[in-house]
Image (tube, helix red, strand yellow):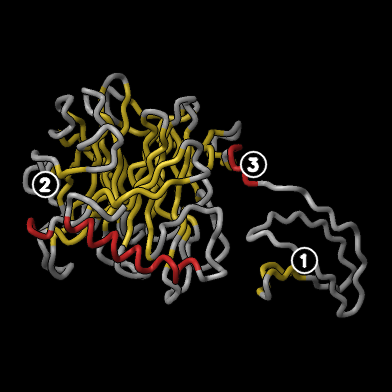
Amino acid sequence: MSDHSNPAIDRAMQSIGAAVSRADADPTRPTFHFRPPAFWMNDPNGPIYHNGWFHLFYQHNPYGDEWGHMHWGHARSRDLVRWEHLPIALAPSLELGEEHVYSGCAWPNGDGEPLLFYTSVKSGPKESRPPNEQWAARPLDAELIVWEKHPANPILALATHGGPLFDREWRDPFIFAEAGRTFMVVGGDDDDVAGVALYEATDASLTRWHYCGLLVQTTKDKLPFYECPNFVKVDGKWILLTSPYREIEYMVGDFDVETLTFTVEQEGVLDPGFSDVPNFYASNILFDEAGRCILLGWVRGFPQGHGWNGALALPRILTIGDDGHPHQQPIPELAQLRGALTDFGTHRLTGAGEVEYTGAAPSVEVQVALTLGEGANVGLVLNGQTLVTY
């Protein structure tokens, strides 16, 4: 898999291959959540269903288990459960001054050819490097394995995008369509305001865009930046998801394609998590052939030093409930992972009593019903690590 026409990708794949055995040796590594063969991953990027395959791209450091050297990793699946790792899709074009290939999306152009859209980050200190640009890449084969940077790049640059002079961190393009028109949202900010910028494609190539205004905005004392904006229509309503350096937040409402205005009716936190670090972050979305809205996100918060870091949350179906708020359910395909059911019966514990169960499965789904006496505490321990205490 490391034999690639791009020398930068070949080097990255060799680096990953040399680290696989170390990553696999860690007993705490997730076993049925998607993760790279080794090293760091964060945001899911460009998920798309094409010719019977779900393609997943993701932010990936092929040189270590910490953030850095951002590439786009790549995998594909028939069912969103079992994944085939593929060669890295995008590497920074160092010869063009590109240091990172940041987050983005995938969308077909007018000829039905899937394109990748991402934020190109130049080299240099964050405070003084050139502003980010929005770039595209196109496939060189029908299997979507090998990609090249689009000759029309940059498809959007701050100096010519037709809108405000955002801060250089303007990034994370996401594309959607409505009423035969194709739009893109990008997170942006200036000294006082954070917003989600809206653009419309001016032709079917999706390499030329027109600035339409801000879909939403707020003062930066309330919210510093709208990372990874996703804007989709689900069950007749529009949902805007953003990752504002805290838990993913949602807005639900109506989008008027004639006036290009978004009227918000409901808002809140999509997934509160259970720690100071948002466990579910940097969402991305695709629609499958059945029209299901599939929600993906990054699971974060793992320690460094084990040859891997980061995983994909289990895919979820996103809907709008009767209460007008977004609802989530794990995709039913995950049931394929279940093996034989083992019933350990009922046990009564007193004092410092414990019950030990043994099994050979590398991962388990546990269902426990507890009846606690007054002042009682009980915990569930797996492989010597306390997971839950009541």
What number of labels is visible?
Answer: 3
Residue beneath label 2, please? 157
Q: Position of residue 313 (x, y in %)?
A: 50, 52
Q: Quadrant of residue 370?
A: bottom right
Residue 195: tell me if it is visible: no
Residue beneath label 3, please? 335
Q: Nearer the viewer, mark 1 or mark 3?
A: 1
- What's under tag 2, amino acid-wise? Ala
- What's under tag 3, amino acid-wise? Ala
- What's under tag 1, amino acid-wise? Thr
Q: Position of residue 256 (x, y in %)?
A: 33, 26
Q: Position of residue 295 (x, y in %)?
A: 47, 42
- Relative to residue 153, is residue 232 depicted above or below? above
Residue sitting nearer the eye, 284 or 303: 303
Q: Nearer the viewer, mark 2 or mark 1?
A: 1
Residue 65: tell me if it is visible: yes
Name the element at disc 3: helix
Residue 358's disc is 1
Q: Quadrant of residue 53?
A: top left
